[in-house]
Amino acid sequence: MGIASKQRASIAGTLARASLVPLAVAAYAFTLHWIYLNLITSNFRYLGYGYTTPDVYTLIFTYMAAAALAFILPNRLRNPSDILLWILYIVAVAPAILIPPYAGYQDASEAALAGIGIALAYAVSIVGARRQPEIPIQPLAKPLSGTSFWILLGVYSAFVYLMIYFTLGLSLDFISLLDVYDQRDEYREGLAGGGAIVGYLVSTQANVVNPLIIAYGLLKRRWYLLALGVLGQAILYSGTGFKTVLFSVPAVFIFAFILRHGRQIRTTWLIWGGVGVAAMAAIVDEIQGGILWTSLFSRRFLITPGVLTAVYMKYFADNPKALLSNSVLEGITTDHYGLPPARVIGYHMTANYEAAANANIFADGFANFGAAGVLGAAVILAIYLRFLDRASAGLPLRVSGLVVIMPAVALSNTSMLTGLLSHGLIAAVLLLALFPREPVAPVKEILPTAPIRDRRQSSKLHRLQGVASPARARSQ
């Protein structure tokens, strides 16, 4: 293909994307609005899910901000950073921009300013993580051999499950989705009774280690590894009651399918996937006469990050910032509340000091340092994504990409610092950096041995060998 043809194809692709992306974001925005108005507020108003008729211009403004972000996001999934950015956009960033205008906590100008602030901050993360494709990514560390890596991972996993057994007990009894809250209370009581370290081990095992085992089992069709990873998630779900652990298994399978057909699948399909999941949950609930699936998927994963963003930004705009006084800056900055931001907002919404309203990285950044905290979270995320891509250099995306799914979801309801230390972000970088790489065969070993009759095939072969083709040599 000539240069002119490539330019025309590039322009055509950009124009197609310029029309398809706004359409997908509009469908997503409409779906979130309809579900929030018709299903969420009527069933969960007592939890703070209110509704105010939005200003039309604010809706248009925030929609344009969300669509612009989607347009500058990667249009192909090439690195694990691309996957993390897209997941975080769908489950946290887009809802945080689109929902506040009608959540009832901010007025029109506040919601608009907050939306554009989050959009600009996330644009910093997107641009900061972007690389020139012709510049190879340098590995972060020397990988381990296959035997050493799997021994290390096996020893670590055995240690985690033994710690769970002696601290909390192990069970394979499947817990109903309606009974998970009782199990969570038991889990928290166990952690409070001296098993705090177990919480970090469980998060790493559930968010990173088991998905890595499942991903490699799928890639190599080693079904015993696949079974071990799924069994491990079942054990952790039974012990903790965390629904995200249970839903991580189908999420990994879905993304494994997406990445297997990565060249044919456009990233706008991910937005349509979010629309489809929310719509399907609403349809099933309508058929069953309940609200379970909408609560699990739409309210929990999509609506709540948007509502809590509005609550956080309104409350901490009118009150003193937290300044990480309950975290790494404890004793250095002034503690105005005696509670972390999640508990402050939980009490603000429910009058219950035990309620923890965990929000996404940008809402937490604002709670601690205002607009500077939002930008700081974006910069830290961009730096992390650079390290993530370096750590995964040389690995199939069907391995490295699946490892970041759950850490990305975790960022929708936690701070950047907590995500790094407690929810597997750093652990993902370390494991991917140490993961064994398969040797690449030399060019001469993969060249065809059959007689070459096609001139085009001959030219391609000589380019691979680094020499001029006979026809070009004669012309020179």
Image: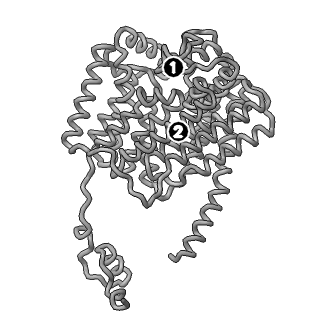
Q: Is residue 128 left or right of residue 40?
A: left
| Label disc, if present, on residue 379 of the rendered structure | 2
- Decide: few, some or many residues near mark 1? Use Cα within 10 Å; few <14, some 14-19, many ≥20: few
Q: Is residue 100 above or below residue 121?
A: above
The disc labelled 1 sits on which kind of residue?
Leu
Residue extending furthest bottom? 474
Q: Tell me the SS state at disc 2.
A: helix
The residues tagged by marks 1 and 2 sit, at their Cα atoms, a distance apart of 39 Å
User: Quarter holding the C terminus?
Assistant: bottom left
Q: Is residue 271 above or below residue 466?
A: above
The image quadrant of residue 241 is: top left
Q: Is residue 126 above or below residue 52?
A: below
Q: Nearer the viewer, residue 70 or 278?
A: 70
Residue extending furthest front? 332
Q: Residue at x 46, y 54 (%)?
A: 262
Q: Residue at x 33, y 29 (%)?
A: 232
Q: Is residue 3 left or right of residue 425?
A: right
Q: Residue at x 38, y 11 (%)?
A: 190
Residue 295 visible? The answer is no
| Label disc, if present, on residue 178 of the rendered structure | 1
The disc labelled 2 sits on which kind of residue?
Val
